[in-house]
Every structure is written in structure tokens, then in C-alpha cells.
Image (cartoon, rainbow, N blue to C red):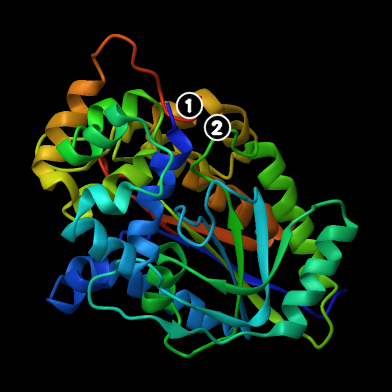
């Protein structure tokens, strides 16, 4: 799991307007430079924040996916999916 | 008797939407910040030391400082989303900032020294409401979000050293210390409320902090602010470390600074002032 790369992708969404616009316009291309597995890229494309959180991505970075409308996420969808991740087997708290 | 001293300590939340809500007419939020601003203006500080927490904006996981201080002329913000506010330079006092940094490092607090720094809503929201007079600002950032966090005890000791550093400042300075942050909040984690990306998982803990601060029982606050407690209180509950640092700075003169806490049951945060009697 390339947790660091996921976090970095999310961080740059708010720091780099060109990166953000690119991600909104053509997500697969924007994900290209990042060292991510196919499953990780798919999770970002699907807005599967539960998967990303369970594998250690930081919540303060993950929220930027819905804030920048990546992967079709809205705040309500983000909430629904991250809440589900709390009870999924294999989950672990961030940063621990 | 040192001529430079801390004239007051204050603590406020930094909820990013508050400036917009107040601009749209939220008199309640406005009045709570105004009560804090009144204390700040009454005590006439000529320097504000803001103790804040960068939300993985200026700093990222590649090089994340536990403690840092801005010492240069180049400081601006907000660099993140604060509805209604755009980035602008902050008034600085590089001489005072460097003197504080030199004292702290000599006293074994190894802060990262930032000659150029953008700051996020944790600095700008408090200043938006409190610093209408444009008093120069020194920013100290504490890592409140990425484990391992510094301990409550360590932050309190940093604050005490900061208080002593203030007394060593040349020029009869009047310094206010501003703590920024909430006590219990989950942002983006699995315990958020349905339909939104945040919640208040431990309002009882927020109330407990307000109670201990009001009583001046800092020993209990330090003992109870364990890593486990802060994890349980939410993904951003480490922000209490800003308050604990501020209390450390104001604390040596604690007999002279009287606390007043504005906290309502169920809320994530408080508005607090420590003013000379």
C-alpha cells in the first residue's frame, strides 16, 4: 500500500491549482506520476475513502477528495463511506 | 522585575466557516469573539504570539516539524479554504521572533526555524476576529494531527519557556499569547456524523477541559491529556496542545491572570481569556 503517495496526491490538490484542475479533468493522467497500485488508483477514482482510510491515509488529507469533487465525492458520500470503514474488519486508526 | 511581560492569554476556536457566518449576520459567534477581542485590546499588547496547528498545509508528511516558529518577514495566509477570506501578508516583528526563537533553542526546545511561511486557518481565523489593530504576530506551530504528538507535559514546558523568553525581550514589550483550536472534533475520520465530514465525539472531554481551565487545575489537565484521550476525542483533538502551551506561558504569572471560560455543554470548543486582575 502506497499510503504516502495517496497522502501526497491529496495534499497537492489544495496546494497546486494546476494539479487539482488536472485531477478534475482527467484523473487517470493526474494519478500517473504517483507510485500507486491499480487498486489504489481505482479507490481514488471511485471515491472509496473507506478503503483509503483503512489502509492508513490521513483523514485531514482524505477530506480534500470531496472538497475538490474528486471521484464523484460529495460531503454526504464521503461521510457515508468513511463511517462504514469504522466497522470493517482490518480497519485501523490513522497514524497509529 | 522584567519589563517585558505577558499581559494576557486567550484561546479561541478556528472553525474555517466562522468568518463567513459572522459576515452573514451570526451575532452569537461574533459576540463570543468580540468578548475575547475586548480583553486583548484592553490589555494593549504590542506583540501577539499565536500558538496554532498547521493542518498539513504548509507542512506535509515529508518534513513535519513537531514545533516550529516563524522568524522571517515573509508570512501570509490563509493558504487553505476560508470562505470569504483571501491570502494577505501578516504584520511581523522579526526582531522579537528571532529573540524568542534564540531563547527557546538555547533552552533546549529545538523548533524548526521558518524564514518564510504560509499559515492556514488555524492562524488566520483567530487573527481575523481578534487583531483588528494589526499588532505584529509571531506564529508557533505545534503538530496536533500526526502521531506521535508531543506530550501535554512537553507543550506546557515549552509554554513556560516561552513565558520566560518573553520576559527576556528587550524594549518593555507587552505580549499577548493566543491559543488556537478546539478540544474534541473528528474531521474526516470514521466517527463523523451522517451527512457531514465532522462531528464532536467527546463533548464531555471538551467540558472537562473547560472546567479544569476555569479551576486552574493544570496538573489534572496535563495528566488527563494522554495520547489515548486525544485520539478518542477526535482526529483534531490534539489542538488542546495549543491551549496547554499558552497556559504554560501565562502560567508563571498565573496568580495574576484570572481565567474566564465561555463554553457551552455539547460544544467542541471554548472561548477563554486570562487577564490581569
Task: Report the quarter where the N terminus of chain B lies.
Answer: bottom right
Question: Tag 1, which chain?
Answer: B
Residue at x-position 49% and y-position 57%: B54
In the drawing, does residue B179 fall left or right of residue A40? right
Q: Please name whichever residue, B244 or B6, is drawn nearer the observer in this view of the structure.
A: B244
Query: What chain is tagged by disc 2?
Result: B
How far apart are the two marked residues, 2 and 1, measured between alpha carbons? 6 Å
Q: Are marks 2 and 1 on the same chain?
A: yes
Question: For this view, does B169 lie left or right of residue B24?
Answer: right
Q: Could you tell me which residue is drawn at 59 percent across and 37 percent down? A: B149
Residue B255 appears in the picture as rendered: no
What is the x, y in percent for residue B16? 30, 63
| Residue denoted by label 2 | B225
Sort mark 2 into few (<14), some (14-19) or many (20+) by Cα contacts within 10 Å.
many
- In this figure, which residue is indicated by the disc labeled 1? B229
Mark sitting on residue A83:
none
Query: Is residue B138 or residue A74 the one in the foreground?
Result: A74
Amino acid at each position: 500500500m502506497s499510503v504516502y503517495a495517496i497522502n501526497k496526491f491529496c495534499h497537492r490538490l489544495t496546494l497546486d491549482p494546476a494539479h487539482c484542475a488536472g485531477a478534475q479533468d482527467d484523473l487517470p493522467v493526474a494519478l500517473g506520476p504517483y507510485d500507486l497500485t491499480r487498486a489504489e488508483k481505482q479507490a481514488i477514482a471511485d471515491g472509496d475513502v473507506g478503503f483509503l482510510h483503512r489502509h492508513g491515509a490521513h483523514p485531514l488529507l482524505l477530506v480534500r477528495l470531496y472538497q475538490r469533487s474528486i471521484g464523484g465525492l460529495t460531503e454526504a458520500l464521503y461521510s457515508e463511506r468513511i463511517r462504514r470503514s469504522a466497522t470493517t474488519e482490518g480497519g485501523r486508526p490513522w497514524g497509529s | 522585575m522584567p519589563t517585558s511581560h505577558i499581559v494576557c492569554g486567550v484561546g479561541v476556536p478556528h472553525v474555517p466557516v466562522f468568518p463567513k457566518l459572522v459576515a452573514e449576520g451570526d451575532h452569537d459567534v461574533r459576540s463570543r469573539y468580540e468578548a475575547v477581542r475586548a480583553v486583548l485590546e484592553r490589555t494593549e499588547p504590542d506583540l501577539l504570539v499565536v500558538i496554532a496547528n498547521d493542518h498539513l498545509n504548509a507542512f506535509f508528511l515529508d518534513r513535519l516539524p513537531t514545533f516550529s516558529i516563524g522568524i522571517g518577514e515573509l508570512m501570509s495566509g490563509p493558504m487553505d479554504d476560508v470562505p470569504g477570506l483571501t491570502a494577505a501578508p501578516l504584520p511581523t516583528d522579526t526582531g522579537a521572533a528571532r529573540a524568542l526563537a534564540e531563547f527557546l533553542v538555547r533552552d533546549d526546545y529545538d523548533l524548526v526555524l521558518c524564514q518564510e511561511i504560509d499559515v492556514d486557518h488555524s492562524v488566520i481565523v483567530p487573527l481575523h476576529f481578534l487583531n483588528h489593530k494589526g499588532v505584529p504576530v509571531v506564529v508557533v506551530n505545534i503538530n496536533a494531527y500526526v502521531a506521535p504528538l508531543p506530550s501535554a507535559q512537553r507543550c506546557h514546558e515549552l509554554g513556560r519557556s516561552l513565558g520566560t523568553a518573553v520576559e527576556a525581550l528587550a524594549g518593555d514589550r507587552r505580549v499577548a499569547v493566543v491559543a488556537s483550536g478546539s478540544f474534541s472534533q473528528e474531521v474526516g475520520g470514521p466517527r463523523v456524523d451522517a451527512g457531514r465530514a465532522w462531528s464532536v465525539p467527546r463533548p464531555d472531554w471538551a467540558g472537562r477541559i473547560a472546567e479544569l481551565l476555569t479551576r486552574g487545575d493544570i496538573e489534572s489537565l496535563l495528566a488527563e491529556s494522554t495520547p489515548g484521550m486525544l485520539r478518542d476525542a477526535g482526529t483534531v483533538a490534539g489542538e488542546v496542545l495549543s491551549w496547554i502551551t499558552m497556559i504554560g506561558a501565562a502560567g508563571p504569572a498565573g496568580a495574576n491572570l484570572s481565567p474566564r471560560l465561555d463554553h457551552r455543554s455539547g460544544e467542541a470548543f471554548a472561548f477563554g481569556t486570562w487577564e490581569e486582575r
